[in-house]
Image (tube, helix red, strand yellow):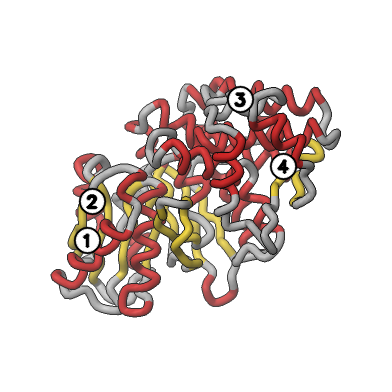
């Protein structure tokens, strides 16, 4: 499998709302990639206290060269701040800055910033343009692409939000140099997910290149991001609002979101919870006789090599079931699970026997600690 040259542009095809996904180094300073998608030469950058000192000046400088005026709103960092209080802070500052309906909001940060800024853009003055500039691996390969925006509720993750597509996505691979190791691994969880749900060739490649990925080999990282975005863009183009195949992207997320909510937002990173959730879903699939022992072991082994959790926390069966009952994929009172038939072949089912679920979630089936 040949690697791509650094720097590429994909297109997420949604008719009139199609948009480019730029991937490569040095994109933050390329203001022209942003200016071409602005409705007016004015923008508001939404970022956080961790990312702002690292990248805000570079982004602003690039925009100024294109004669774009860019104000900034700097929020507190962390999943626990992805809530109504922070959203209202964004609205307060937008109004103080006299932002208009054609003022573009630019999300500069990880998944929390992208989700929150996107939701703010969707409902501020009934919709204002926005652009995603993800600075974590997880955001670059997943949350920045596809138009899902949301904030959390104490009873469930991402329960309040909407679908609202950006005008463009800029994934600057240089930002991954400052990413903590734990955050890098969390992003790799979502990368592995694409191989598991529908891209066996990519999964094989990840098995061969995981050590280089962990070591932040530039070419390997760029390829992993490009391949992941290509997979997601193809799925979203077929099913923008998750009425069918897009639900496969939630592999591991029903269990993962329960872990995040049950432990308290921010205790585990999203990718860590998803990794444990994928292991739980794989063990459920194995206990149901759907996936082979070899495929299950390969899945667990690759996640372990990525330095990710391969067991869920001991929340207790009742707590897991209660939290999963609030999942967005519940339909007709039944939880819809994403399960595996094989590596590269996922499907959706509500027919998980309660005894299998209990066995895995209590640790007997190796799903929870």
Residue shown at the point (25%, 64%) measured from the top left: 88
Distance in Å between CA atoms under marks 1 and 4: 41 Å
Q: Residues within 10 Å of mark 2 (few under 14, many from 20)?
A: many
Q: Which structural element holds mark 2?
A: strand
Residue 26, percent from left and from top: 35, 44
Taking depth in this image into account, of 24 and 74 the one nearest to the observer is 74
Residue shown at the point (57%, 46%) measured from the top left: 322
Which residue matches tag 1? 89
Distance in Å between CA atoms under marks 2 and 4: 37 Å
Distance in Å between CA atoms under marks 4 and 3: 15 Å
Residue 145, percent from left and from top: 51, 56
Snapshot quadrant of residue 127: bottom left
Taking depth in this image into account, of 95 and 70 the one nearest to the observer is 95
Q: Residues within 10 Å of mark 3 (few under 14, many from 20)?
A: some
Which residue matches tag 2? 75
Distance in Å between CA atoms under marks 1 and 2: 8 Å
Residue shown at the point (72%, 25%) measured from the top left: 365
Can the viewer see residue 114 in this picture?
Answer: yes
The answer to which of marks 1 and 4 sits earlier in the sequence is 1
Query: Of tags 1 and 4, which is closer to the observer?
Result: 1
Q: Which structural element holds mark 4?
A: loop
The answer to which of marks 1 and 2 sits earlier in the sequence is 2
| Residue 187 located left or right of residue 95 | right
Taking depth in this image into account, of 4 and 130 the one nearest to the observer is 130
Which residue matches tag 4? 199
The answer to which of marks 1 and 3 sits earlier in the sequence is 1
Taking depth in this image into account, of 177 and 273 the one nearest to the observer is 273
The answer to which of marks 4 and 3 sits earlier in the sequence is 4
């Amino acid at each position: 499998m040949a690697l791509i040259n650094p720097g590429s542009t994909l297109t997420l095809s949604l008719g009139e709302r199609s948009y480019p996904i730029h991937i490569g180094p040095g994109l933050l300073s390329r203001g022209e990639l942003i200016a071409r998608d602005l409705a007016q030469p004015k923008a508001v950058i939404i970022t956080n206290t961790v990312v702002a000192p690292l990248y805000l000046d570079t982004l602003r400088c690039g925009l100024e060269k294109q004669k774009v005026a860019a104000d900034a709103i700097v929020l507190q960092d962390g999943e626990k701040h992805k809530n109504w209080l922070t959203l209202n802070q964004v609205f307060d500052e937008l109004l103080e800055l006299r932002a208009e309906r054609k003022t573009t909001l630019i999300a500069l940060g990880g998944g929390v910033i992208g989700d929150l800024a996107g939701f703010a853009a969707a409902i501020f003055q009934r919709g204002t343009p926005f652009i995603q500039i993800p600075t974590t691996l997880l955001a670059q390969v997943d949350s920045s692409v596809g138009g899902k925006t949301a904030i959390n509720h104490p009873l469930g993750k991402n329960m309040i939000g909407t679908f609202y597509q950006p005008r463009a996505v800029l994934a600057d691979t240089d930002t991954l140099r400052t990413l903590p190791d734990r955050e890098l691994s969390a992003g790799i969880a979502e990368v592995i997910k694409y191989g598991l749900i529908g891209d066996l060739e990519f999964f094989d490649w990840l098995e061969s290149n995981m050590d280089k990925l962990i070591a932040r080999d530039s070419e390997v990282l760029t390829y992993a991001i490009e391949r992941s975005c290509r997979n997601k863009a193809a799925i979203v183009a077929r099913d923008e609002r998750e009425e069918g195949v897009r639900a496969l992207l939630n592999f591991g997320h029903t269990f993962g979101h329960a872990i995040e909510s049950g432990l308290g937002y921010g205790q585990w990173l999203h990718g860590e919870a998803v990794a444990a959730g994928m292991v739980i879903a794989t063990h459920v699939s194995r206990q149901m006789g759907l996936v082979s022992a070899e495929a299950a072991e390969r899945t667990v082994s690759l996640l372990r090599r990525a330095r990710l959790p391969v067991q869920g926390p001991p929340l207790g069966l009742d707590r897991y079931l209660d939290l999963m009952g609030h999942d967005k994929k519940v339909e007709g009172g039944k939880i819809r699970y994403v399960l595996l038939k094989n590596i590269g072949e996922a499907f959706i089912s509500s027919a998980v026997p309660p005894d299998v679920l209990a066995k895995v979630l209590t640790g007997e089936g190796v799903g929870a600690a």
